[in-house]
Image (cartoon, rainbow, N blue to C red):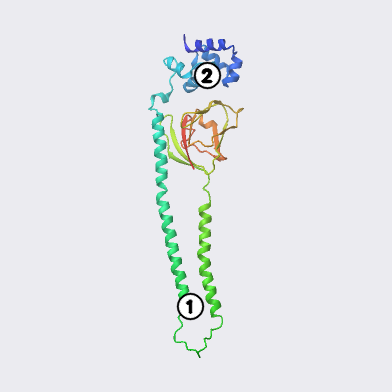
Amino acid sequence: MDVGARLKEARLEKGLTLDELQEITKIQKRYLVAIEEGNLGVLPGKFYARAFIKEYATAVGIDSSELLEEHKEEIPKTEEESEIQYTRMERSRKEANVDKSSSFSFLPTIIVVLLVIGIFFVAWYFIKEGSSGEGNPPEEGLTENEIILNEPNTGASDNGAQDQVDREPTDEKEEAGTATDEEKPLEFTVTEEGTGTVPESTLSLNAPDDELIFTFESASEVWLDVENGDGESFYSAILTNTDSPLELDLSGEESIYLNIGSAPNLTFDVNGVAFEYPVDPNERDHQRIWINIQR
C-alpha cells in the first residue's frame, strides 16, 4: 500500500472529510487530494511534500517519523537530506562552546574596569592627603605672648578648595554607578552565518528581561517549526496571512531553533525588536536558525 492510500484509509477510519482535514492541518484541499492519489508533483516543492505528509499523518493518528521512514523511497527527498546534518549532540556542543566563549570574553573587560577603579581611588587618596597638608601648616615657635592672626578669607578659600576636592570623586562615583546600572538593550549578534543550500545560522540574543515574546507574521503560506534546545516543539505547521500575527511566549528558554520554509514571506520580532536574517532570504528561502539566549 502506497503512502497516499495508507493516509486516506486512516482518514476514513477517523471519519474525517477532506474539508475537516483541511481545517485541522491548514493544508489546501487540492494538496490533500494530490497526496491521497499519489500525485506528489502537484505540491509546491519537495520540502512541502514531506511537510504536508507529516501534518496529514499527525492529524489522522499515524506516527509521521515511522511513515516517512517506511515510504522513504516513494517520498521525494529534499536537497538538505544530501548534506551533513547536525545531530543533537553536535548542536548541544556548539551551544556549550558559544556559552563558554561568551563567558571568557567578559574577563578582559572586568579586569580593565577593576584597574581603572583602583587607579581612580589611589589618585583620589593622594589628592586628598595633599590638600590636607597644605591647609594645616605646622605651628612652630609659638610663645604665650604671641598672637596668631589669620589672613582674611584664607580659611574660607582653603575650605572651599577642600570641599571641591571632596565633592569631585563623589560625583564621578555617582556617574560611574549610573553608567554601570544601565541595562544593555535587547539585540541579536551573529555567531555563525550558515552556508550551503539550506544554511543553518547561529545567533546570540542579549535579553535583559526574563520575558521573551516571539511574534511571527506571514505574507503567504510559510512552513514554520519552532523548538527549544531539547527538541520540544512549540509550533509546527503552515503559517498563513490569516493566522498572523502568531505570538509565542518562550520566556525561560535557553535556546530556540527555527526551521523556516519560505523566509522571504516570514518576518518576526522578539519583544518588539525586529529580526534580520543573517543570510539574504531572497537568495536562500529555506533557512534554519539557532538563537542562544544570553541573560
Residue 274 in which image quadrant: top right
Say what secondary structure mark 1 lies in.
Answer: loop
Say what secondary structure mark 2 lies in.
Answer: helix
Q: Residue furthest bottom?
A: 145
Q: Is residue 195 visible?
A: no
Amino acid carrying mark 1 in the image: Asn
Query: Residue 170, relative to residue 154: is it above or below?
Result: above
* Label 2 packing within 10 angstroms: few (<14), some (14-19), many (20+): some
Q: Position of residue 176 (x, y in %)?
A: 50, 57
Q: Mark 1 or mark 2, which is nearer the start of the sequence? A: 2
The image's mark for residue 58 is 2
Query: Residue 222, relative to residue 12: is it above or below?
Result: below
- Who is closer to the viewer here, 80 or 283? 80
Q: Residue furthest top?
A: 1
* Label 1 packing within 10 angstroms: few (<14), some (14-19), many (20+): few
Q: Position of residue 30 (x, y in %)?
A: 57, 16
Point 47% across, 33% down: residue = 289
Residue 92 in which image quadrant: top left
- Distance between mark 2 and mark 1 Cα atoms: 88 Å
Amino acid carrying mark 2 in the image: Thr
Point 41% across, 40% down: residue = 98
Point 42% across, 56% down: residue = 114
